[in-house]
Amino acid sequence: MDSIVVTGNGPLQGEIPIAGAKNACLALMPATLLTDAPLTLTNAPRLSDIRTMSTLLESLGAEVASLQDGQVLALSSHALDSQRADYDIVRKMRASILVLGPLLARYGQAEVSLPGGCAIGARPVDLHLRALEAMGAELDLRDGYVHARAPGGLKGAVFEFPLVSVGATENALMAATLARGTTVLKNAAREPEIVDLAHCLRRMGARIEGEGTSTLTIEGVDALGGATHPVVADRIELGTFMLAPAIAGGSVECLGGRLDLVQSFAEKLMATGVEVTQTERGLRVTRRGDRVRATDVVTAPFPGFPTDLQAQFMALMCTADGTAVLEERIFENRFMHAPELTRMGARIEVHGGTATVHGVERLRGAPVMATDLRASVSLILAGLAAEGETVLSRVYHLDRGYERVEEKLRGCGARVERVKG
């Protein structure tokens, strides 16, 4: 099994290209199921989760071609021969549930395995199902599968999500594009990935209003066509690499980065004393002093501080001047990186959904283990600020969501190596 070795090496200097958003691409790919015309996605990230979604779509009869070293995905569902998403594929990735809405909308039926558990929390799919039921879907949960039918087709409806859910909003949005009549989704997620999906669907001929707000209005159409769509930059990868010079010192330009994608995060980062400036090519991040100021954060749905950057920000706080309180309000079990950071000399106290981090002057390299995707990269970032060598195991978590992270960091002078196991 591969591992990654990080050796603290002082300030970073250079530039890092930001890939297309994994979470956006995983929602865009199932949109091919809504049409028999080709869908082409550019700026696609090269990640294991993208390959898993490709495998799932191919199991349904879709064609998926990876072009230009994986940065372009050409998809077609003109000859789909199945509406069943099997457990053996779905269990690998929770985003697989996003095929449910498109299959049901286009074919009037679908059988999709319920996703398995998740290390960072329960993450139930009941909101997906309730939204589809509001549009007239008949659902039967048995043998670990969602058996869905809409014999007369889905119908427009007004549905208010009791809780904000990105995945449920995406599923309902795609399903509504082919429903008869008008669908209004209230308390919808506002994330950039939702906006990106709406823009792609509009290119395919969908009639959508309100993306980026909490109310989406979709007027169903008879059929969608093909489109070519660039995947939005990954705001979580962007925020992660913005933290690299904040932790190690120096100045790095994140190519393709946009401040509007990470506004709340950038404000917290600047509150620590780090400089963030928009350039013609992206975002430049510079740390001039020896230590940053301790800064509290509370995670929240977009446009709040992203839960997917909480672990990485904790790594920064480990060497901050003062004490920071991090409150996790999205997932109930997302401090599993704290014990691993403690192995490196961090002082962290966790009580329920709150972590108190007492900054230390220096971390120490140690053997550590990734427990989930974001935890894995937080430990790499911590290694940049540690004395000696940090060895990260179980890096398959990292490969789900970060494209060539060691190469990108090495390009700025970091000592990061992948060791094949």
Image: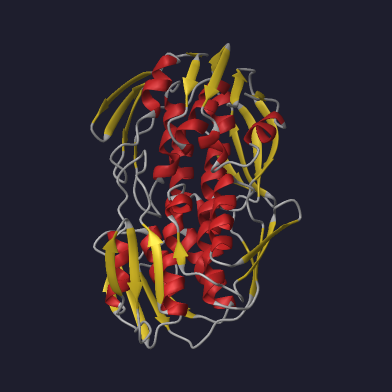
Indicate how the structure is coloured in the image: secondary structure
Find residue 288 and report its horizontal and vertical position in percent: 59, 27
Residue 258 appears in view: no
Q: Along the line of sight, which residue is nearer the eye, 60 or 335?
A: 60
Q: Quadrant of residue 218?
A: bottom left
Give the residue furthest to the right.
68
Q: Quadrant of the C terminus?
A: top right
Q: Is residue 402 above or below residue 201?
A: above
Find residue 150 and report its horizontal and vertical position in percent: 35, 80
Q: Is residue 78 above or below residue 16?
A: below
Find residue 277 and report its horizontal and vertical position in percent: 59, 44
Q: Is residue 2 left or right of residue 372?
A: right
Q: Along the line of sight, which residue is nearer the eye, 323 or 9?
A: 9
Q: Is residue 233 above or below residue 119?
A: below
Q: Is residue 263 left or right of residue 256?
A: left
Find residue 195 and report its horizontal and vertical position in percent: 49, 65
Q: Quadrant of residue 303?
A: bottom left
Q: Quadrant of residue 390?
A: top right
- Residue drawn at the location 63% of the way across and 51% of the way down: 45
Q: Is residue 50 above or below residue 230?
A: above
Q: Is residue 73 left or right of residue 171?
A: right
